[in-house]
Amino acid sequence: MEGAFRFLGRVYRLVAKHADRLQGVTAGKLTAEERATLTPDERRLLRKAHQTLRHVTEDMEERWHFNTDIAMTMELVNELTDLDSAFEAGAIRPAAYKTALEFLAAILSLFAPHLGDELWAGLGHTEPLLKVGWPEFDAELAAEDELEYPVQVNGKLRTRIRVAANASEEEVRSRALAAEKVIQH
């Protein structure tokens, strides 16, 4: 239980740290032009935020796997924390950071409703989360740019390769066969 309180305290401090800076910022859906100008850090943050929201949304509608939802939420907090200095340095636009924090507040409202509402208010919203519609994830932003494939030879893992998510089967096969540890076997 102590770990849960530590985690929730960490989330609260993260939001409180940026609450003043994010008060007047409008977050939400990105236009095609805004999508095209996302920095790598913004894309990374928004990918994790939309993946987490997608996972939690699907779990609440179908599977009810709360443990994985909490784990994904913790990963989102880790991503926000990792990119905190980039946000402070101006490498991440306030709207992108606030979007991720708003998703986090909405997700946490399922498990810690009072904290979710407190975070939501800290982000400048006057209406409680109960009266706000559930946010929608963007499948395009949630999609991975690269995929990792394990490569086995004779039933043993020899290496892992990373290829573009839209790579053809032939491209994946040729990259796997060209891997040094695969060539050795």
Image (cartoon, rainbow, N blue to C red):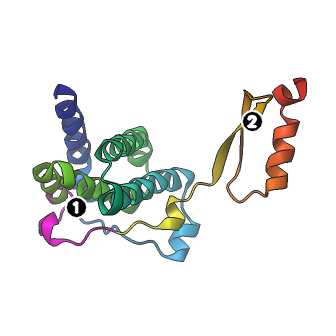
Q: Residues within 10 Å of mark 1 (few under 14, many from 20)?
A: some
Crowding at dot 2, Cα within 10 Å, few <14 / some 14-19 / many 20+, comes out as some
- Residue tagged 1: 23
* Amino acid type, callout 1: Gln
Q: Is residue 128 magenta?
A: yes
Q: How many marks?
A: 2
Q: Earlier in the sequence, mark 1 or mark 2?
A: 1
In x, y percent, where is residue 24? Answer: 25, 66
Part of the protein shown in magenta: 121-135
Secondary structure found at label 1: loop
Q: Amino acid at mark 2?
A: Val
The residue at the point 58 percent across, 54 percent down is: 144
Q: Nearer the viewer, residue 157 or 21?
A: 157
Q: Position of residue 61 (x, y in %)?
A: 32, 63
| Residue at x 29%, y 46% (from the top left corner) | 66
Instruction: State the residue position of label 2.
Output: 151
Q: Residue at x 54, y 66 (%)?
A: 140
In the rendered image, residue 147 lying in the magenta stretch gets the answer no
| 1 over 79 or under it: above or below | above
- Which picture quadrant has residue 62? bottom left
Q: What residue appears at the point 30 percent right and 59 percent down from the top-left corner?
A: 60
Q: In this view, which residue lies farthest toward the front?
A: 155
In the rendered image, the quadrant that contains the N terminus is top left
| Viewer-side residue, 111 vs 104 | 111
Q: Secondary structure at mark 2?
A: strand
180 sits to left or right of 108: right
- Which dot marks residue 62? none
In the rendered image of this protein, does residue 116 appear above or below residue 161?
below
Which quarter of the picture shows residue 121? Answer: bottom left
